[in-house]
Image (cartoon, helix red, strand yellow):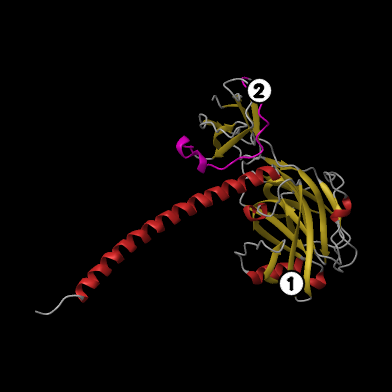
Amino acid sequence: MDLRIESSTDSTLTLAWTAPGDDGMSGSVSQYDMRMDTKTIDPLEALLAPIIGGEPTPLPGGETQRMTVTGLTPSTTYWFIFKSQDRSGNVSPFSNVAQGTTALDTTPPTFAQVRIVDFSGNSARIAWESGEPATSEVNYGTSEAYGLYASSNSLVKEHSLPLGNLALSTTYHYQLTSKDIFQNSTRTADMTFITPATSTATSTSQESKILPPIGKSSATNVLSKDFPSVNFSPKTLNLKSKGKWITVVLRMPNNQSIGIDFDTLRVNGKVKPALDVNRAKMQNTLTRYGTLWLKFSRAEIAGLVPPDTKTLTLALTGTAKTGPFNASETLKVEHNITKAEWERREEMKRKAFETNKQKRVTALEKLIAEAMKRLAHLQSQLEKVKGEMYQ
């Protein structure tokens, strides 16, 4: 087989090969089994490499077959190998190993949903979203000279920074900057917001008119005063992604944000958050700003996805001092497997289990037979000793 890398971008690699036939180059095989890893694949141990899934329907033998693998990390080398199976269940040997490297990411982050929220006295908070994980920086002030500054070096898609030293009934200018992991930077044009005339706390948001939201209604920018809400990032659950975490922002009304029992937090009743920070500080942040940032294992969240589905509703539940709460959001699902593929994998796991089980049974039966033989010999020795007479 002639597996090869045909093209690449910063997040995709396109594979190409000559489709094998069912009989030589005649007809077509029934399916492919494509494997991928970020380290060299040994053809003798290829079954240990992760399955990609989503392989294309085989073309007739002799034609050029292609497959684009998406959701890859920029500037990263990947190794690929595959085998095929015909309609009679005959499986080919694994192909040659193809190696490819994704391109360097040169695309800067994009901005959406820029808004000023949580006005309270001389403070507020600015929030926005970026198309990829990036740092957060805001310069602001009463003129385009700015003079005030806030930043965070955390790479996130959901950005939130506090704004302090604000005066009432005043127009403020601000400019945002975000930089991704590859140092691609984006800076907005100058934007403005007006602080309220009173110091009474409010969750009303002022949305930027210069950067309109992408694909969302502006109604989603106003924080609910009555119900908790969650914001998962990323919005698409790519089952091929090698990312480790999914970020969740929980927003709680002021009257419900006290006394969170962190041990009760679950996504869909199963997945716990990674709570590796000071819980008292988390509670203080939630009480003050009504916002709690959490992270969940991407692999555990992916384990909640059933086959043959393109969307998944994730509900974050927990208990606060005022009682239990529930907030949910629906994510898109990419590169999900079909039910048939899921059943095939389950059958492979079952067969592997049964094979291993039989090996263990055989080994134990052998040990028992040897023990029985030894026991019979000892029994014979015992009877012989009992029959001995003193002379």
Name the residue rendered at 79%, 62% in the picture: 327
User: Of the residues under marks 2 and 1, which one precedes in the sequence?
Assistant: 2
Q: Which mark is residue 360?
A: none
Identify the amino acid type marked 1.
Answer: Thr
Predominant secondary structure, magenta span? loop
**x, y (%) of residue 325?**
78, 68
Q: Which residues are magenta?
A: 40-62
Contact between marks 2 and 1 (CB within 8 A): the answer is: no
Secondary structure of the residue carrying tag 1 is strand
> Badge 1 is on which residue?
319
**Structural distance between the alpha carbons of marks 2 and 1:** 58 Å
Please give the name of the residue rendered at 73% of the width and 59% of the height, measured from the top-left corner. 249
| Residue 159 x %, y % | 73, 53
Residue under pointer 2: 60
Of residue 206 and residue 95, the one placed in the foreground of this image is: 95
Q: Quadrant of the N terminus?
A: top right
* Residue 102 found in image quarter: top right
Residue 229 included in the magenta stretch of the image: no
- Choose top left, top right, bottom left or bottom right for residue 60: top right
Q: Residues within 10 Å of mark 2 (few under 14, many from 20)?
A: some
Question: Magenta span has 54?
Answer: yes
Instruction: Tell me residue 221's x, y (percent).
Output: 85, 54
Amino acid residing under circle 2:
Pro
| As drawn, 339 above or below 296 | above
